[in-house]
Image (tube, rainbow, N blue to C red):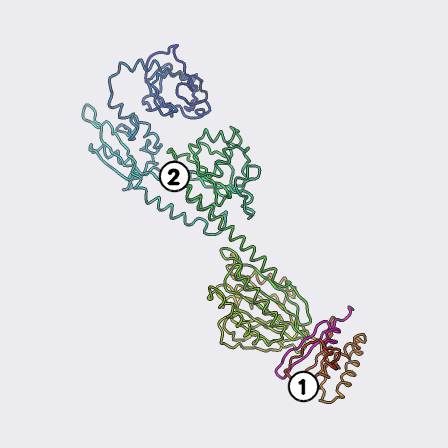
Amino acid sequence: MQPFSSGTPLSPGHSAAALVDARGKIIWWSRAAAALVGWSDEEVRGTRARSLLVTPLAGRAPSSGSTARVQLRHRSGDRVDAAVTVIAGAGRSGYLVLADASAAAAGDGAKAPDSGRDLFTQEQIAVAEFDAALRLIKANQLFSDLGAECKDVNGVSGTIGPDDSTVGETLAGVVRGGSPLVAAGFRIPSDPDRLLSLVCFPVNSSHGKAAGVVVAAVESSPADRTGQLVETYRRAFEIGGSLDVVGAARDLVDVLVPAVADMGCVDFPDDVLQGTDPPLGYPGVEASHARRVAVKSDDGPWPAAMVHAGQKVPVVPDQDANAAIAVGGAFVVTPALGRQLLLDDPALIAQLMPPGMREAVVCPLYHRGRLFGSALLWRTRNLRPFTEGNVKLVQDLCDRTALAIDNAFHYTRERRTAIALQQSLLPPAATQSSACETAGTYLPADGTASAGGDWYDTIALSSLRTALVVGDVIGHGLTATATMARLRAAVHTLADLDLPPDELLTRLDDLVQRMAAESENPDTVGASCLFALHDPVTRRLQVASAGNPPLAVVRPDGSAAFLPLVPGPPLGVGDHPFEVWTETLPAGSLLALYTDGLTGRNPEAGMAALLTHLTEVHRSGAPLEEIGAELVGRRPGAAEQPDDDVTLLLARTRAVAAPDTRRWEYPADPSAVQRAREDVTTQLRTWGLEEQSFATELIASELVTNALRYAGPPIGLRLIRNDRTLVCEVSDPSSTQPRLRRALTTDEGGRGLFLIAQLTTRWGSRYGARGKTIWTEQDLPAT
């Protein structure tokens, strides 16, 4: 407490008592004291005794038994006149303070009005008096509430004015000059959103010498803080920009601390952190286990005893007040109410209330009937209570944060759906065939971009050939994924027709143009695509591209290059031909088909790096799955979140050995049918496939007979085998498409293709540069 002046001796009429330790803090409070000023023992214990004085008293430390007439602050806001007596303990280890309101009232009756005292007891203007050495003599409560920086004007913590002068420098100038001064623009470090204007006038002694200075501090009008309010709202637009819920929480506390509060934190329920929608309404405490995700303190580090970021928030027993706060708006909490909500549990209070808390604001992050979390803000050094404007600002920013979190959830749900749909549409990552072994890698876009429409495919075609496809649809999200699904289905259908790569892309281009015509936004419909066809018998690779990066090849000798194919325009442009590049590759060559997400924002540098990495990993001889993962991990910007889908399809070519294929050519002679049957029987005996002789002879004879009847020479017959399949092909110069039909009982023909369909696993026809080829496949028994 402040020192007391000498006064009347102790009398037995004192009824209100308190114990104060050597530091001036109250350690015991009697019931009579509580009745006198309305403050309970729990509310004042641990606070400084001087905080109960309306007007601090100046002077030296009192002698034991000294008394002073003071005004005490009642809990209701009224003032209580009392005579206070202080009795010092042994060695001044503490004080016993006694107060008697009736004695003070009796003494005051003889006093004359004191206008100087009235100046220091008014509540509209903060007033203080300093001596010539700028030591505080007396001040009213409003000035005391401004903080220590305004009292200790000689200290380095003095507030700064518009001309970079401290309060102390300003007051010293008034004492030296002896002239009044009006100074504006002083900011209080403990409450930086408050600006003060100071009216300073000197006080002279009876001898005319400077005895001190009186200061009246007037807070600037709210209009003077408009700039800071605008800046706070401007920064609010940064909340939730990353579509990351934890990032949105950190943005919120960064905006509100220190602009509104000294400390702040955000807690999220487990549902939000796990990426699932919280339930509608108030979930109840038992169902709302939360974790602290963001903290910020403007006054040093976060208190060690409180819950830190990343830690679970202790569960508070459910109360009606919890639900009211959770589903309502921003709510101001006093220390007494905070202790009540925490059931006066010392452990919970230490974890959830900062030391020196003066007021708090709790605001739920509530949107569309769902509770996404809560924000808590505390004022500790800042002595001012939260204003309605502060609370409204907190509510607005919390509403914005809840909206950002909900948007992030919408994005997350759509992204998960798009990725799940896209991955369900992709083929198996690894395939094995006579033409090649393949391994596909797909990495969806991350960050603010949803999954795109990239895809890869491996399609088994006739005569043991394999088609390799990669594509990239314009845009992201479910629309791009749906477009990708349509294009992939179209590629499968067109590939089954055994169309050349350039014709396949031309028909696919027509489909994309029709899709664009059906769309409300035709400019957003388009795709790139690369189609490669590998024949293991001839070891020939045919490639055509519609706006896709070129295919990379690493030959068995380690030489690597991009195929010099000039890509055509992306799909959907129309009226442009596509070029086909044909090259014969040795078995064991490594092919890399990819989309532009693999090469990054600088395609030229990314492609050069890809070729280097392909050469290195090819020498290792590692499985294709491992090679694909390593190449994706080495891509440019791999340390960052990809803003575009990354798609890579690797294929290692194979070849059918020369002894596993045989070809014959026959003239247009009826005897060709018999010769074809004999050639087939002989070859199957050589391969040890006698069990397939009957079916294969019948197939060959039917197909050669149809060629002789409807097409003419030359007629070619070819047998191809691997460990699982036997292929029989018959070629002729006709372009007539054979078709399966049901023959009537009176028909003399029309049953050949029906018999072939019963004897084979699958069959079909394809067109070439000189006619067509009808092919069949039969499964071979496992060996």
User: Which-is-in-front pick, marks 1 and 2?
Assistant: 1
Local packing at callout 1 (Cα closer than 10 Å; few below 14, some 14-19, many 20+) is many
Which dot marks residue 154? none
| First in residue order: circle 1 vs circle 2 | 2
Which residue carries the number 2 mark? 390
Q: Is 321 left, or right, of 716 in this rendering?
A: left
Q: Amino acid at mark 1?
A: Ala
Q: Residue at x 76, y 85 (%)?
A: 673
- Quarter holding residue 426: bottom right
The residue under label 2 is which amino acid type? Asn
Residues under numbered marks 1 and 2 in contact, where contact means CB atoms less than 8 Å apart: no
Pick whichever, 621 or 83, lies toward us.
83
Residue extending farthest to the front is 746
Residue at 37% across, 10% down: 11
Magenta highlight on residue 488: no
Asked if residue 90 is positioned above or below residue 715 in the image, the reply reads above
Please state the total of marks drawn on the protein image.
2
Mark 2: which secondary structure?
Answer: helix
Up-down relation of residue 693 to residue 399 (above or below): below
Of all residues, the one furthest to the left in this rendering is 208
Question: Which segment is the magenta one?
Answer: 753-782
Residue matched to label 1: 711
The picture places residue 218, in percent across and down from the top left corner, at 28, 34
